Image: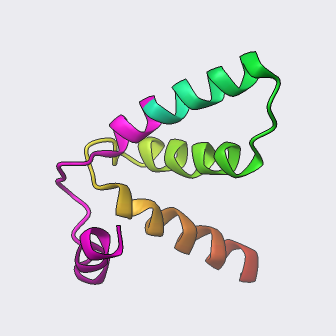
Amino acid sequence: MVERNGPITAARDFEHSAAPVRNLVKDLGIITELAGEMGLSMPATIESVKVFDDLVSAGYSEGDISGALLVLERRARESVG
């Protein structure tokens, strides 16, 4: 993942991707549904869902999953600010 996402993140080229956010959001939905059915607590997954849902809300559903950096940067600014 570092080899794949590192250059995308360094270039901040999140616009187009072979791994769009919408696919990860779908997968995270399946994971959380199955976890719920099995009675599993998945706090890291729940937080990931929030990050990627924020990214979709910002209009990046077709952007690269590395674009999660944008949400994390915004949250960091808000927590400091």
Name of the residue lying farthest toward the top: 37
Horizontal side of 42 relative to 53 (left or right) equals: right
Within the magenta stretch, is there residue 52? Answer: no
Considering only vertical position in the picture, is 50 above or below 7?
above
Tally the numbered discs.
0
- Image vertical order of residue 15 relative to residue 25, above or below: below
- Residue at 53% of width from left, 41% of height from top? 53
Which residue is pictured at 77% across the width and 47% down the height? 43
Q: Kindly identify the residue that appears in the image at 53 percent across and 48 percent down.
A: 54
Residue 76 percent coordinates (x, y): 64, 76
Tell me: residue 68, above or below residue 39: below
Q: Main secondary structure of the magenta part?
A: helix
Q: Based on the displayed image, in which of its 4 quarters is residue 29 positioned?
A: top right
Using the rendered view, name the quadrant where residue 78 is placed. Answer: bottom right
Determine whether, in the image, residue 20 is placed left or right of residue 78.
left
- Give x and y (percent) for residue 18: 17, 48
What is the quadrant of the C terminus in the image?
bottom right
**Residue at the farthest front position:** 38
Between 25 and 38, the one nearer to me in the picture: 38
- Colouring chosen for the image of the structure: rainbow
Start-end of magenta stretch? 1-26
The answer to whether 19 is drawn above or below residue 71 in the figure is above
Q: Position of residue 16 (x, y in %)?
A: 17, 54
Residue at x-position 46% and y-position 61%: 68
In the depicted view, which residue is nearer to us: 30 or 75?
30
Residue 24 among those drawn in magenta: yes
Q: Quadrant of the N terminus?
A: bottom left
Q: Position of residue 5 (x, y in %)?
A: 30, 70
